[in-house]
Amino acid sequence: MIIILRPSASQADADQILQRISDCGLKPLCLPGTERVVLGALGDERKLGALHLESHPAVERVDAVLAPYKAVSREMHSASSVVTIGDFPVGSDRFFIVGGPCAVEGLDPLRLSAKVVKSSGAHALRGGAFKPRTSPYSFQGMGIEGLKVLRQVSDELSLPCITEVVEVADVEAVESYADAFQVGARNMQNFRLLTALGKATKPVILKRGMAASVEDLLMAAEYIVSEGNQNVILCERGIRTFEKGTRNTLDLSAVCQLKKLSHLPVLVDPSHGTGVREYVTPMACAAIACGADGVLVETHHCPQEAFSDGAQSLLPAQFEAMVNQLKAFADAAGRVI
């Protein structure tokens, strides 16, 4: 439920109502706006009804949030949220570009790729220390040593770093080294992991599952936000369809839906979305056009030697050219890079 206060309502009025919501076992939310304050209540709506808040002199009206996802719904929070990674405001008028290899392969290889990301003008470094792979015989990542390498290169180049977390036991370690968590498609509905990330403080980039609907993704985000971590960024990375010409089908219409239904920032991953190096830049440009707040792109200093996903990783010159091309599209869309 959302409780819209009158323009004349005081902070004391808001605090009193929030306390009543809390006392009846519901989770209170305060959503201050530019003109008036909106309060929220998550939980059993029958308990809220028993409070008869619509009769409070400071309350203008009480509305039900119809979407099954409450905290991430634009019904609950009409203004778009901004999530900060490092010092970059994701969800603002600035377009966020993340680059780096699929996996952390060692200090020197990561440093070479990261220098390309930095020199091109991108804003953050990606690289997986833990790699959930389809085949048990594929490279599974360097683990904790990979996190240490990622942190070292991140500090050297003053680039915030993002890496995937794959299980609850790794949350604390990843949070101590990375600037943001990434939840991959395979873990989008790992509800124990999502709950643990809701108790963390670092931002979470939540990727859409390969067979998940937009509502499934928003419900997964709700798990994180309902536990207290408001810093969630959604990511469209392609879904599995009958099409064989690309690794996945990049569903850019989902970006439009997500921006309409939720206040959370939205990124696009054209690397996993297509799996084809030549398609990455066009789809990154399309991401700006459909309203995305940033892109997550794989680049490697020598893709033919990459331990994973070399076929979809941009060459250094291609990554730099992509960033330059994105500047023109960002300008046309009223964004800056």
Image (cartoon, rainbow, N blue to C red):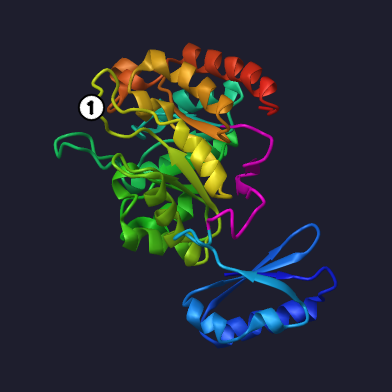
Residue 103, given in percent of the width and then of the height, sits at 34, 34
**Quarter of the rendering containing residue 121:** top right
Compare residues 50 and 114 and report the one nearer the observer.
50
* Res. 153 visible in picture: no
Label 1 crowd (10 A; few <14 / some 14-19 / many >=20): few
What residue is rendered at 67% in x and 51% in y? 79
Query: In the rendered view, does 225 fall on the left or right side of 7?
Result: left
Examine the rendered structure and indicate whether residue 300 appears above or below residue 130.
Answer: above
> Residue 125 in the image: x percent, y percent?
50, 34
Q: Going 65% across and 44% down the picture, which residue do you hit?
A: 87
Magenta segment, prevailing SS (helix, strand or loop)? loop
Q: Can residue 154 be seen at all in this image of the molecule?
A: yes
Q: Residue at x 64, y 48 (%)?
A: 80
Q: Nearer the viewer, residue 227 or 155?
A: 227
Instruction: Indicate the quadrant containing the C terminus: top left, top right, bottom left or bottom right.
Output: top right
Q: Position of residue 64 (x, y in %)?
A: 56, 67
Quadrant of the image containing the N terminus: bottom right
Nearer-the-camera pick, 213 or 115: 213
Please report the bounds of the magenta region as a residue range: 72-96
Tell which of 189 and 305 is nearer to you: 189
From what the image shows, is residue 127 above or below residue 212? above
From the top left corner, tell me how far across and down residue 233 is, in percent. 51, 46
As drawn, which residue projects farthest toward the right?
8
Q: Is residue 188 left or right of residue 244?
A: right
User: Residue at the location (60% across, 48% down)?
Assistant: 83
Q: For the residue labelled by badge 1, is the local secondary structure a helix, a strand or a loop?
A: loop
Callout 1 amino acid: Phe
Magenta span has 230?
A: no
Residue that mark 1 sits on: 242
Q: Is residue 168 left or right of residue 154?
A: left
